[in-house]
Image (tube, rainbow, N blue to C red):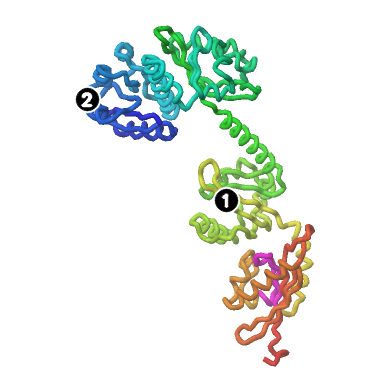
Amino acid sequence: MIRVLCVDDEPALLDLCRQFLERTGDFTVETAGSGAEALVRLAAGPVDVVVADYQMPEMNGIELLSLIRRDSTLPFVLFTGRGREEVVIEALNSGVDFYLQKGGDPRVQFAELAHKCRQAVARQSAETALRESEEQYRVLFESGSDAVLVIRDGVIAQVNRRALALFGRSVEEMTGRSPGEFAPPRQPDGTGSLEAAARHIQAALEGRPQSFDWLHLDRKGEEVFVEVSLDRTTVRGDPAVQAVLRDVTERRRAAVALRQSEEKYRVLVEHAHEGVFILQDDRFVYANQAIVDLIGSTVEAMLDSPFQEAIAPEDRERIVGYQRLRQEGGDAPDRYTLRLLHHDHGRRIPASVSVTRIDYRGKSATMGLVRSLEDEEHAEEMVRALLDASPGVALLIRPDGGLLAANRAALEAWGAAERDLFGRSIFELMGTGVEIGRRGAVKEAVETGRQIRYRDRRNGRIQDALITPLFGSDGTVERVAIFSQDITEQEGG
């Protein structure tokens, strides 16, 4: 972990610096509001790099650097909004490691700052090691978490253990050869590996640090993707290049796999026969072609429109209530029926909906699957004829209890119109004692696929119910018919 001391007289900038750098996971950040405060902090304990503004009250950034340089080679990055040429020249003459100007996209700006800090610390570590004895240098060189190469005269002069492990080779196999020799003839972008390696090394030797992605091959010929940072350094007074390599092979493979998975999922959803939608803030943020065709709209018209507009007015209050309850963490049904509203002529389209909570683009969302029930209405007409012919209460429900149809006797018993009850659970319309028994009987019929006869007593009356499962084309129970009669007199009750 790299320890950073950020010095600036603007508290807001210090907070941003801390947030962006610590978010990478590579840094711990302390802050100081002035040069004097920074000196007190430096005296209290070590840090790895100082990032300081130029223009500050009482002591500017270069004056702070000069005081630090009296007895330390601590890496120093001048991070300032002052871009005058004389400031840049003064900073470089004073020994600043990097000069970075504020402004622009914060993400790009702080990503560059993080890179400069890593480079400054890596450079400092290498230079310190090279100034010390060979044994001390070897300990520091080998302790890094990344692979490190030292390149002199265009070939590898030194490697640490992490580099040997990364390439799967020995010191003898690696030293004396160009880094480009351990790569395929061409990089993924089509450039020749030997030529590109020589070009990057030469640029670093000229004082232009290099950062780029690179494809190596290990001893077995397996691809190894790395992030490379090249910086000029010296080895016993001679110019050299230090290369820091970070293995990103697994991260790259995971990203490729994720993209492929997302593409397969997108194709699957776009060609699905069922409608698929995603809601955020009660608006459509995704709709596939199936749901668009179902309600006679377009993708462009649906996106960012309120989801209530796709629901028939008589069902809106109920469905909006489910959505509110779901957003508040309540126990809202995840499957229900409703009537959609066709955009062209207001025709009602009966449909079943299944919903779940997901994360979509970093935010909580609701994803739903919609299936039209129009094709099933013809079959239901036959069932409805049976319901209407029944002398007692007759209901057609889903396996979960949602009402699909009811005969006149049932509606009169409940004192409500069918449109007001459509989709509601019949168990909610019953008394507590009756609800528990009927729910169990329906569940048994669905699970066993057999007719269940059930009796209960309500308000002193005995009800005899025949619960009949109705099977779909796939052999599963799709609906349940309930025929109930009052048999109090027959039972002598």
**Type of residue at label 1?**
Phe
Considering every residue shown, the one lying at the far bottom of the view is 492
59 left or right, relative to 158: left
**Residue at mark 1 to residue at mark 2: CA–CA distance:** 56 Å
Residue 96 image position (x, y, % from top left)? 33, 16
Disc 2: CA contacts within 10 A as few (<14), some (14-19) or many (>=20): few
Give the vertical position of 409 relative to 125 (above or below). Answer: below
The residue carrying mark 1 is 307
Name the N-terminal-most of marks 1 and 2: 2
Residue 90's tag is none
- Region of the chain picked out in magenta, as a range: 393-410
Q: Between residues 133 and 149, which one lies in front from this camera angle? A: 133
Considering every residue shown, the one lying at the far left of the view is 58
Classify the position of the N terminus by image quarter.
top left
Report the residue at 42% width, 22% height from top: 139
Residue 342 image position (x, y, % from top left)? 66, 52
Residue 424 image position (x, y, % from top left)? 61, 66
